[in-house]
Image: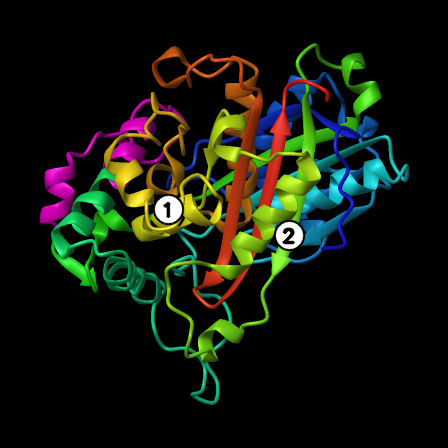
Amino acid sequence: MGSHGIKDRVAIIGMGCTPFVEHWDRGTDDLLIEATAEAFADAGVRKEQVDAYWLGTAQSGMSGLTLAKPLQLQGKPVTRVENMCATGSDALRQAAYAVASGAYDVAMAVGVEKVKDGGFQGLNAFPIPGDGTARTLTAAAMFSMVVPAYGEKYGVSEGEMREVLSHIAAKNHYNGARNPRAQFRKEIAAEKISAMPKLAGQLGVFDCAGVADGAAAAIVVRAEDAHLYTDKPLYIKALSLVAGNGSGVIDPEYDYTTFREIAACAEDAYRQAGITDPREELAMAEVHDCFTPTELVLMEDLRFADRGTAWKDVLAGAFDLDGRLPVNPDGGLKSFGHPVGASGLRMMFEAWLQLRGAAPAERRIPADGRRLALTHNLGGYPGDMVSFISILGSELG
């Protein structure tokens, strides 16, 4: 790939994140003001000191006015970003690249989505139904195909697959129960998850992420300026984005046990960051657990497990909060819901807390000397998706 990366050239100096819940009494403006106010205070920066803004939203506004009006910005460039479920992450990517280029000294990335009172379920805005040739399967139906495909390819029985998926959901709900910003804060036993009626293939309701409203924000500066603002910046090691060409949906060889865009994105991100063994070098990961089988496949596409073995690692607890590589320590999409434009920055907010030792003790990852975190989004469906990966670190080098 052609990306050179910006390793250790840009740092995050402040972040903010609202609770991700059903904000029936609050609008998009309220969420934007809350998330940005926390980020400004965290960094010790006033809005006038930010040179440029990037706003990620898929459905909650058009143009930079969506952010400039509630913040009452004066004479500032504000760019609206949309890239499916990678929207918030792509806003951070563009803000970071703008600072790395020297175009600006201080930039802010914000992600927001307000969908619960909009009469919209949250995930299927486009394409707008038209001539009848568009996809008619739901997202749950598309991702449910992973389950029999993975089981057949790797010799995992239907009962074992059910146990694996329930472990993933129970893990993420366990972590989310310890997070005051999460929508669903209740532990759910794996047995209860397994017993739920099925709504798409072998997927029950607890195999699916919910919908929520929320916003998150980050302020970035050049790495050499970071200590002007904080003693604990996070340095950007890699920002990788891959947009697929949709060929998977018409490829008879596509088998639903790997997502090509994500595997390519991981290769690029690890090369940018200089990582050769992610399962040993990363301290934690936040991944796009839109459905439980998605997280299973990601463990292999992100090289946290060898092909065909992730299901064994899941059952062994390798990705639990106290496991070898904690995955979704904040509770993930399963506990937060998925306000599309905000989720990517919410994941980075968890890395911000964990790598700086600011996460609450009851869900803090083990302190074993590792100083790198990975966040990941996918947008779209198997065979037709975009992928984003960030790698952040608390130390230079």
Mark 2 to mark 1 CA distance (whole Å): 19 Å
In the image, is 155 to the left or to the right of 286? left
Image quarter for residue 178? top left
Asked if one can make out residue 287 in the rendered structure from this viewpoint, the answer is yes
> 87 or 243: nearer the eye?
243
Query: Can you identify the residue that label 1 sits on?
Result: 295
Q: Report helix, strand or loop for mark 1.
A: helix
Q: Is 218 within the magenta?
A: no
167, above or below 338, in the image = above
Point out the image quarter for the N terminus: bottom right
Report the residue at 37% width, 24% height from top. 179
Report the amino acid beneath label 2.
Answer: Leu
Near mark 2 (Cα within 10 A), the count class, few <14, some 14-19 or many ≥20, is many
362, above or below 186, in the image = above
Image quarter for residue 41? top right
Q: Give, as a single range, the part of the protein colored magenta.
A: 168-196
Image quarter for residue 151? bottom left
Query: Where residue 334 appears, x then y in whole percent?
Result: 33, 42
Q: Report helix, strand or loop for mark 2.
A: strand
Render colour scheme: rainbow
Report the residue at 82% width, 36% height from top. 99
In the image, is 251 to the left or to the right of 34? left
Query: Can you identify the residue that label 2 sits on?
Result: 241
As drawn, which residue projects farthest toward the bottom? Answer: 131
As drawn, which residue projects farthest toward the right? Answer: 102
In the image, is 253 to the left or to the right of 308? right
> 318 or 52: nearer the eye?
318
Query: Where residue 269 appears, x then y in whole percent?
Result: 63, 43
